[in-house]
Amino acid sequence: MSLFLTLVKALEFHWGRREPGRIKYRSAQPMFVPTHKEESAAWLQPKRNNVRVELELAEVLRRHGNFAEAIKSQERLVNLREIDEMRKTKIYGELGVNYRHTNRIGDAIEAFQKHYHLAARLEFEMRAELCRSTSNLGIAKFQLFLQDVTKTVYLDDSINLQKERIRTSEELLKDLGTKFASATKNDAAMADVGINNAWLSLWRDRLSMWRAIGMSRIVLSYVAAKKSDIAVSAGLDAVKTSSAPDATWADPTVKALCRFSYGYALQANDQIPEAKIQFSYPAGATAKCTPAIALCKESSDENRGYLKMVIDSGADLAAYDEVGYNALDYAIFANDIKTVTMLKNALACQFGVDKQAEELKAAEIRKHFRDIFHSQFRPILREGRTDCIKMLRAKFTELLRKDPGKRTRFDKLRLVSYEDFKNRQALPRWNMDDSFTREFDQIVTSGARVPFLIFFSYRWIGEETDPSSKNPDGPDNYQYRRMLDALEQIIDRHPDVESQDIFIWLDCACIDQEDIEVGRRDRGSNTLPIVVAQCDAMISITDDQYQSRAWCVVETMIVQTLKESSKHHHWYIHTLLDGSTRDPEGVLEPGPDRQQYVNRPSLLGLSVESDRRYIEFLERQSMLLGRTTNEQKPTQELPSEHIRILSEFGRSLRDDGGEPLPMHELDFGLELARPNCTGGLVVVLYHPDPSQVYYHGYAAEEAGCNTLAAIKDLVRSASNGMVDTDLITILDSMPLISADYNGSALHVKAQETFLRVLEAKRPDVVLSCFRTGTNIEFMKHLQGQGIGKDDYPARFTFPDSGHQFDRISAFHPSYAVNRMAFDACFRHLLMLEFHQAAAICWSGIWVQEPWMVQLRRHCARTMLHNKGSLDIRADRVAKLCIAVTDFKAALKKLHYFQLEACKSKHSPRRMIRRSKMSSKACDIGLLLQNDAVVEDLGSLPKYPIVEIVEEALRCLGAEDIELNTAIGTAGYYNHLRLLDQESHLKQPHTRAIHEMLITLLGQLNLTFTAEPRGYYSWTCQLQAAAFVRFAESVEDRLRRMEETPETAPMEVEVNYNTVCILSE
């Protein structure tokens, strides 16, 4: 009977739909009503059907002349979440008709506008989907052709479809700037149907990326069609498009695949050395996606063929991308045995069997680590349960029990009870008494209460009294006594925790440091991040050297990332009351709330140098853990006080015509002022530039503005690539006002508002990159004191709140990257100031070195020298000649082969660093980018870059290579002869530096073109890019060389020459 009634209802519904079509309105209306009001069967999807019925009913009511009831129904329906966009379009049209019939003309116009805009938006999105489908269909046709190369129709189709993708994406991008242009001006009708800046930005990025993908894919088809010259041109276009300064949309994988396509075309055109450059891009760099990595992300037989080409070119397969994974990692994640085998063989050829085994082992560990944190721990962390830590422990225990692969790579959770620890009277050691530690499973089964686990992060100090000692503590058990003091205080902080419930994890007792059972020490070290996640609290036993020790800092990074995602993880810092004595008493305080990264752990000090590879691994895993847990942050944040103050001021502003500040301009200022939290680093600029446009969105303006792009690169450099501008605050001393200070009431109010915003932000460090006129005494002292005039941070106190912060005096980044772009010293100084601010903010450690004072003095003198005309062309050309002379001197000093003659493994790194080769390359790159320099190079008797090429050939012992005389071809010298130059060095790092020099020589050579009568033309921009890439590669390789830095600040001497500001 129920089935019969269901069928009857279904028939009634369909009859009701058919009747309106026959214009039998009055007979149709009753059929809708009972079906609409009664509950349908589940398989009829009652919500959707009810909506459909009510829409038809409203249409019938309108045709009956019952406009009021129709309007009432349609106004309710248009706001329902169940309504899809297509039906909503129809409702707006029906509403407009009903409003017009009831003389509500204003409402009718608004409804018709929404009808039009929503229909236009849907039509645009459907065209975009068509654009997407053409390229996917094209690549599928190309694959069909590869299966049977006699069917050239498939190849022709693939080319035409990719062309259609490119053409359609360009047309749609044009429509965004014309048809939907008013959306950038906050058009209310457009905004109501979802056409706003966010929608425009989304589709602008998506279409730009689809266009680049189409450009790279068509290269494959052109090569297959034996149109290599066209393929080369298309590949170059793809690279230029994806690497352009405004290509903020470019996904790292897309960039890398564009590089591969270009290299693929070059190789097909017999331009082998140029192809190698693209396959190896970015040469020597880390934390960037390479073509090899991109191809391994999407394993297939086709991509394996391309990967073999990349491998054969000699690309660095040990490089890892922005999330810490290399090509082998992705192949293992995908369980692609064929690709893994290919990479294993290539790694053995590149680095030797030992390095190959090490890379394979590390990749397997990363796969397990990814599975544990991403697949198992992430769901538990996201739920935010009160027992999440207990669930993490249970999950890890279960994984070890079920998965033999994980048991071979990770150790069980082992702990020491508080009572045993207290009775020991010294730090326990694994090799003292193996039974001293207990496995977590045993602890849980032996007691009914939930254990409270504490992780101790501390510095091994045994070698301070006895350099040969492997003891973690001194003879007086100093660290042990400090830990006891900290444990007593943590019991007071957690009164609900009984002493018998406390269990401790510390490396000297819970890791087999002597590797008594082979492999157990590795398993213990690999498990460290997972142990931190399973502990309720971490206690850092700090001292003046804590932040300079690699193990301490990597543990800090891990716990801070966890603490940001879970309110149940605690972090405490034990600080001595008197650091000048051996008194263990201290204060236990919670660690800071904000994300706080110190100097890169893999560059810091270690007691056992062989541990460095563990540190690098754990550092990379903490990066991945951060990408996992940071997703737990709520998407809707409540505005903090400093954001609220700035927003109120912006909304109060009016122009001369009484118009309010445009919303996109206010939104941009608020975006700079984020994040919505107190503390941290604040960069203060002068005021917004009058030429800035805001309606393209924050990301586009950040990429297009030299100042903001420089700040982004400086912050990333100062944090070793681990912090971006989204974690610092950028304020203007005159917020939201683009005019220079004139003493008016509005300008005074703006400065006062800035100080209120800054006080509400409660910063730890303020980097003052501004100077301004002002009558406010606090502002006079807060602003930058002038280039090179202030070596030390100043301590400031807000008079009302009493909050204190450190002020670092700097100067506006625009001076370095715009006004004095031809002189690299200002970029060096700006980088130094950002490093100082970051170090003080995130570690509290900064040591002034003599070279820093010299740099500040040099910049102050240079500024005075250039205070007159800014177009001192002769001076700029002279600087280029000096930089070239210095670079040639560095070449002579190294003579390439001398690197191998160094007896100590530390010497090559010091030798290269002291040569300042990367710094001079940076200077040359900067100067060659300056148009004024380029214009006057013709006045020189000999082009300086030719001198570098000649000196490099002399160092190689290849002076006999003949000049290139083939008119119209690339190369100053015979490029094929240059290709014969190979590195004879055996040590991997020194060989890499040597190959970078050979690559630079080859790239410079190809920037020349032979002309008639023995002349040569050249492209300065390509030469500048070659020097910049070389400098970046050298600096990246220096960081990877195995050497323990003498002090953390010494690393800044290397970093301050980094050319991140110039990177693509």
Image (cartoon, grey):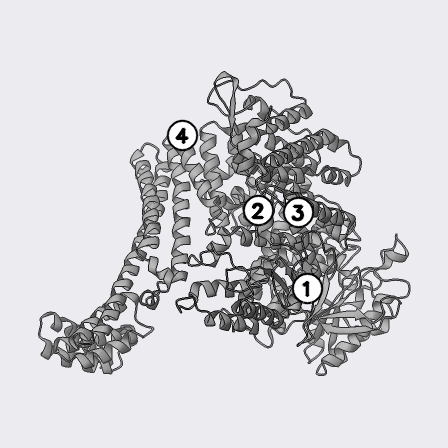
Q: Amino acid at mark 4?
A: Asp
Asked whether residue 303 appears in the rendered view, the answer is no
Residue 1028 placement (x, y as % from top left)? 59, 40
Pointer 1 residue:
781
Mark-to-mark CA distance, 1 and 3: 24 Å
Q: Residue at x 54, y 68 (%)?
A: 750
Can you tell which of label 1 and label 3 is closer to the viewer? 1
| Amino acid residing under circle 1 | His
The reply to whether the C-beta atoms of the residues labelled 4 and 2 are less than 8 Å apart is no
Q: Amino acid at mark 3?
A: His
Distance (Cα) linking label 2 and label 3: 15 Å
Q: Mark 3 to mark 4: distance in Å?
A: 42 Å
Q: Kindly identify which numbered label has been placed on residue 828.
A: 3
850 or 527: nearer the viewer:
850
Q: Give whichever of discs 4 and 2 has the lower sequence position.
A: 4
Q: Which residue is mark 2?
A: 819
Helix, strand or loop under label 4? helix
Q: Is residue 436 left or right of residue 530?
A: right
Query: Residue 99: which quarter of the image?
Result: bottom left
Crowding at mark 3 (Cα within 10 Å: few <14, some 14-19, many 20+): many
At numbered mark 3, what does the secondary structure look like: helix, strand or loop? helix
The earlier-in-sequence mark between 1 and 4 is: 4
Find numbered disc 1 in the image and state the secondary structure of the residue it sits on.
helix
Residue assigned mark 4: 229
**Residue 507: image x %, image y %?**
76, 62
Query: Distance of mark 4 from mark 2, alpha carbons?
Result: 41 Å
Looking at the image, tell me whether mark 1 or mark 3 is earlier in sequence order.
Answer: 1
Name above or below for residue 957 compared with residue 488.
above
Q: Quadrant of residue 927?
A: top right
Name which of mark 3 and mark 4 comes first in the sequence.
4
